[in-house]
Amino acid sequence: MRMTPQRQLVLDAVRELEHATPEQICQRVQVTAPTVNITTVYRTLDLLDRLGLVRHTHLGHGAPTYSVQEHEHVHLVCHRCGHVDEVPCELLAPLAGTLRGSHGFELDASHLALSGTCRECLTTSAPKESP
């Protein structure tokens, strides 16, 4: 595969933004190359994903988020406020071992988003104690 200028711009945008939707990547690319459209960005991201240069993660509803292959961690997505936090993949090692042993399933925690409620939302929605 030939690395065209458009492909390089998309890959560079993914690297710079670290986590980005195709729309955000397109906006970044259009700063340098205004004629590159969203269809080109989607096709390029699909190709780069198949080549193993980028990976996508679904952090909830809507478009996937892209990052470079080396950028590995588990995403913690708050379903109340939408905040996304990152934790090391190794945190899921005990679960990965259990899944491997009991189901013969090899977990890829580097390509994972977990949904829940963040600390801030839990704190603000906790019932207040009476005096």
Image (cartoon, rainbow, N blue to C red):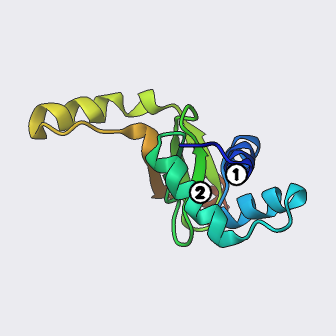
Is residue 79 depicted above or below 56 in this figure?
below
Mark toward the start of the polypeptide (2 vs 1): 1
The quarter of the picture where residue 99 lies is top left
Residue 126 or residue 95, whichever sits in front: 95
Residue 47 or residue 55, whichever sits in front: 47
Number of numbered discs on residues = 2
Q: Are marks 2 and 1 in contact (CB under 8 Å)?
A: yes
* Position in image of residue 34 (x %, y %): 86, 66
10 Å neighbourhood of mark 1: few (<14), some, or many (≥20)? many
For the point 28% across and 34% down, the residue is 96
For the point 54% across and 62% down, the residue is 64
* Position in image of residue 39 (x %, y %): 63, 71
* Position in image of residue 94 (x %, y %): 30, 29
Residue 88 or residue 33, whichever sits in front: 33
> What residue is pinned by disc 1?
10
For the point 28% across and 36% down, the residue is 95
> What residue is pinned by disc 2?
44
Residue 81 or residue 65, whichever sits in front: 65
What kind of residue is marked 2? Thr
Relative horizontal placement of residue 68, taking residue 5 as reference (left or right): left
Relative horizontal placement of residue 103, taking residue 6 as reference (left or right): left
What kind of residue is marked 1? Val
Q: Is residue 118 visible?
A: no
Disc 2 on helix, strand or loop?
helix
